[in-house]
Image (cartoon, rainbow, N blue to C red):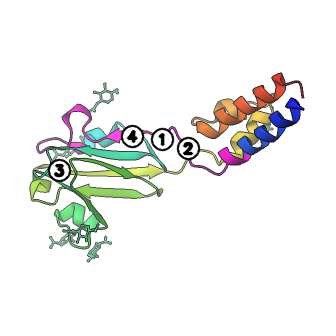
């Protein structure tokens, strides 16, 4: 009786986790403890981080003093906000990096010329979710160890499998 409840719950859990995005996305705080301010070389900061699809980039600054515009390469090179894709001004802006591409962000009030510009390359997730699940099932195969970022799904699936196992099924 209880076993079938566990079985059904485990199946629901496995199907649920395979459809939601990873929960352990990284929040990359631009400039770390220096934040979003003039006079900082954000190329050095960006080179020190690896960005994956689903991560966040966040800008922390004095509200009303600075802002953030997402622009294209021309806007980044020339410090212009013409044709900007988006703009933020809360002082604590969390921007999802949902595509594998190069993103360009600048400050739109002229401080771009003082270095307030950052460009980051967002990489696709290293492995599709099905590969992670398959790797969990083939314990003899070392694929799982080679997956650098198994994420929430793989963790949840292992959890479900352990639970499954200990429930006596
Ligand atoms: C920032 O650092 C990069 C990498 O060292 C360098 O190529 C670039 O010229 C620097 N930018 C500024 C504005 O100093
Ligand atoms: C790069 O990252 C390391 C480790 O997090 C840190 O100690 C170092 O200060 C960072 N360098 C830059 C330029 O952000
Ligand atoms: C903007 O930058 C591009 C290079 O990305 C350059 O060819 C163009 O002349 C610049 N335009 C202005 C108005 O500065
Ligand atoms: C960037 O957007 C501007 C304005 O929409 C456009 O004129 C320019 O060609 C675009 N540059 C690139 C590299 O796409
Ligand atoms: C900022 O974005 C909003 C939409 O989110 C848009 O209506 C507004 O025109 C943008 N502002 C500028 C200066 O581009
Ligand atoms: C592990 O799996 C991969 C892909 O399915 C396969 O190519 C490889 O030969 C397997 N390795 C072992 C040791 O079974």
What residue did someone put label 3 on?
Answer: 116
Quick one: SS at disc 3? Answer: loop
Q: Position of residue 103 (x, y in %)?
A: 35, 57
Is residue 70 visible in the rendered structure shown here?
A: no
Q: Residue furthest front?
A: 1
What residue did someone put label 2 on?
Answer: 22
Q: Which residues are magenta?
A: 15-42
Q: Contact (CB < 8 A) between labels 1 and 4?
A: yes
Quick one: SS at disc 1? Answer: loop
Q: Quadrant of ligand 6?
A: top right
Nearest to viewer (mark 3 / mark 1): 1
Q: Residue at x 16, y 60 (%)?
A: 108
Q: Position of residue 162 (x, y in %)?
A: 76, 26
Mark 1 and mark 4: span between their CA atoms? Answer: 7 Å
Mark 2 and mark 4: span between their CA atoms? Answer: 13 Å
What residue did someone put label 4 on?
Answer: 27
User: Where is the C terminus found, in terms of image quarters?
Assistant: top right
Instruction: Bin the neighbour count of mark 3 within 10 Å (Cα to Cα): few under 14, some 14-19, many 20 and up.
Output: many
Q: Contact (CB < 8 A) between labels 3 and 1?
A: no
What residue did someone put label 1 on?
Answer: 25
Instruction: Bin the neighbour count of mark 4 within 10 Å (Cα to Cα): few under 14, some 14-19, many 20 and up.
Output: some
Quick one: SS at disc 2? Answer: loop
């Amino acid at each position: 009786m209880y076993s079938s409840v566990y079985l059904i719950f485990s199946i629901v859990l496995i199907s649920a986790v395979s459809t939601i995005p990873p929960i352990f996305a990284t929040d990359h705080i631009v400039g770390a403890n220096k934040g979003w301010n003039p006079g900082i070389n954000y190329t050095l900061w960006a080179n020190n981080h690896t960005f994956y699809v689903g991560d966040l980039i966040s800008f922390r600054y004095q509200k009303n003093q600075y802002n953030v515009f997402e622009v294209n390469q021309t806007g980044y090179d020339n410090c212009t906000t013409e044709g900007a894709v988006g703009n933020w001004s809360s002082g604590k802006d969390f921007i999802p990096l949902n595509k594998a591409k190069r993103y360009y962000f600048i400050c739109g009030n002229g401080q771009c010329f003082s270095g307030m510009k950052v460009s980051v390359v967002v990489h696709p997730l290293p492995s599709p979710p099905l590969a992670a699940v398959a790797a969990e099932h083939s314990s003899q195969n070392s694929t799982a160890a080679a997956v650098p970022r198994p994420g929430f799904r793989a963790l949840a699936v292992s959890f479900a499998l352990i639970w499954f196992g200990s429930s006596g099924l």
